[in-house]
Amino acid sequence: MELLLQPWPWYVSGPLIALVMVLLIYFGKTFGMSSNLRTLCTMGGADNFASFFKFDWKSQIWNLTVVLGAVIGGFIAVNFLSDGSTIALNPETVSDLSSLGFENAGASLLPPEIYDWNAALTLKGLLILIGGGFLVGFGTRYAGGCTSGHAISGLSNLQWPSLVAVIGFFIGGLVMVHFLYPLIFSA
């Protein structure tokens, strides 16, 4: 049981991800979490309103089981396999985040300065969540997939567009952390 309670090192989890990707390639499947949103919208009748949603959603049921597994696995991990320890952040990162107003950086996965109801119900908090959600949704659709789809599945299939998308994700992340984050949270 102690093995399950500890974070798994890269040399265990990395090869397991590679094994799953090899199996998916062997069976002719492509993995992507964001594509499940399209499937769910089609199942809900969105194909009656837009041609983007007209496809055989039943062929993607296997992908929905991945989402179900992620939800169930996340629930089990948080409620039964977490030891409550804090996140090991670099002291410089903690100092940088503290200067931006994050008082308990590393104490939780979701900083209360963004995800707590008190923060989310302020104008700034609401704009951050709605704006961030819009940008993630637009970016995912514009790039033809999300970070996991391009970085894990797309690169495993040696897709050139996924390499371009992953490079763009890293550039966008650097711009966000070094230029936009200080503008948003130091105000």
Image (spheres, rainbow, N blue to C red):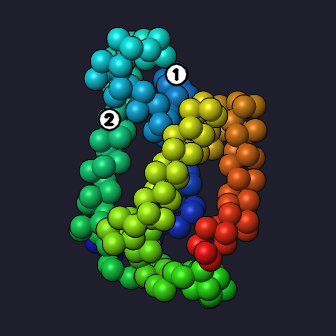
Quadrant placement of the N terminus: bottom left
Mark 1 / mark 2, whichever is N-terminal: 1
168 relative to 32, above or below = below
Q: Look at the numbered disc 2 and give the secondary structure of its residue.
A: helix
Query: Residue 80, image x and y in percent?
Result: 24, 68
Query: Residue 84, image x and y in percent?
Result: 33, 80
97 relative to 143, above or below = below
- Identify the residue position indicated by label 1 in the image: 28
- Identify the residue position indicated by label 2 in the image: 65
Q: Amino acid at mark 2?
A: Thr
- How many marks overall? 2
Observer able to see residue 53: yes
Quadrant placement of the C terminus: bottom right
Residue sitting at x 31%, y 63%: 77
User: Disc 1 to disc 2, how far (Cα)?
Assistant: 17 Å
Residue farthest front in this picture = 123
Query: Residue 141, image x and y in percent?
Result: 56, 32
Query: Residue 102, image x and y in percent?
Result: 51, 81
